[in-house]
């Protein structure tokens, strides 16, 4: 359904996913963020959509309050790269869980290689270094070459 005016969009945004109560469960919270991510993507508010999808899968992975800030930074950046590399900014729950697990495995391997390296790493700010990684995400073009899908 297309909305003509800004007011109609605002009404739709307020009425679609309901507000959370203070005693919401983690499942209700990630479901809320997921619904918001889908809604923001539908209306092409991509920065908000990315943020909601990222938070959804950090919550589902039970890591939203992780003390490993480097992991959170790595995940936020790489998950954004993944979503932006698709034709549409959207993902199913199982797809997001799979990418979360893929990124976690990559991060653990990178940290292990850093610790075993003979070359010392300056560990104060790894953000720039992490953003330089070009990971092989499981993207695959379908037969028409028009749609991105999980391979």
Image: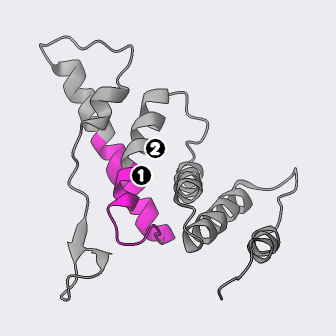
C-alpha separation, residue under disc 1 versus residue under disc 2: 6 Å
- Foreground pick, 52 / 87: 87
Image location (x, y in percent) of residue 46: 52, 60
Local packing at callout 2 (Cα closer than 10 Å; few below 14, some 14-19, many 20+) is some
Query: Viewer-proximal residue, 117 or 17?
Result: 17
Q: Mark 2 highlights which residue? A: 76
Relative vertical location of residue 17 with respect to residue 46 in this rendering, above or below: below
User: Which residue is disc 1 drawn over?
Assistant: 80
Q: Residue 20 location in percent, x, y?
A: 82, 58
Residue 53 is left or right of residue 84, and the answer is right
User: Residue 33 sits in which quadrant?
Assistant: bottom right
Asked if residue 144 is among those painted magenta in the image, a careful observer would answer: no
- Residue 2 placement, left or right of 57: right
Is residue 86 or residue 59 the one in the foreground? 86
Residue 93 on image: x %, y %: 50, 68
The main secondary structure of the magenta stretch is: helix
Identify the residue at horizontal 70%, vertical 54% (top origin): 26
Quadrant (top left, top right, bottom left, bottom right) of the C terminus: bottom left
CB-based contact (under 8 Å), mark 1 and mark 2? yes
Image quadrant assignment for residue 132 = top left
Relative image position of residue 116 (x, y in whole percent):
18, 20
x 55%, y 42%: residue: 63
Q: Residue furthest front?
A: 5
- The range drawn in magenta is 79-106
The disc at residue 11 is none
Q: Which residue sits at x=65%, y=69%?
A: 35
**Position above or below: 40 against 128:** below
Which secondary structure, mark 2?
helix
């Amino acid at each position: 359904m297309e909305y003509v005016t800004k007011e109609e969009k605002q009404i739709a945004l307020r009425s679609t996913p309901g507000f959370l109560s203070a005693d919401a469960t983690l499942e209700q919270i990630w479901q809320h963020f997921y619904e918001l991510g889908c809604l923001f993507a539908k209306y092409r508010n991509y920065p908000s959509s990315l943020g909601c999808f990222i938070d959804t899968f950090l919550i589902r992975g039970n890591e939203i309050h992780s003390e490993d800030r480097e992991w959170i930074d790595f995940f936020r950046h790489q998950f954004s790269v993944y979503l932006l590399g698709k034709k549409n900014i959207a993902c199913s729950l199982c797809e997001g869980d799979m990418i979360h697990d893929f990124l976690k495995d990559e991060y653990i391997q990178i940290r292990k290689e850093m610790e075993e390296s003979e070359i010392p790493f300056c560990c104060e700010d790894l953000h720039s270094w992490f953003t330089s990684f070009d990971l092989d995400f499981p993207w695959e073009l379908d037969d028409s070459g028009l749609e991105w899908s999980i391979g």
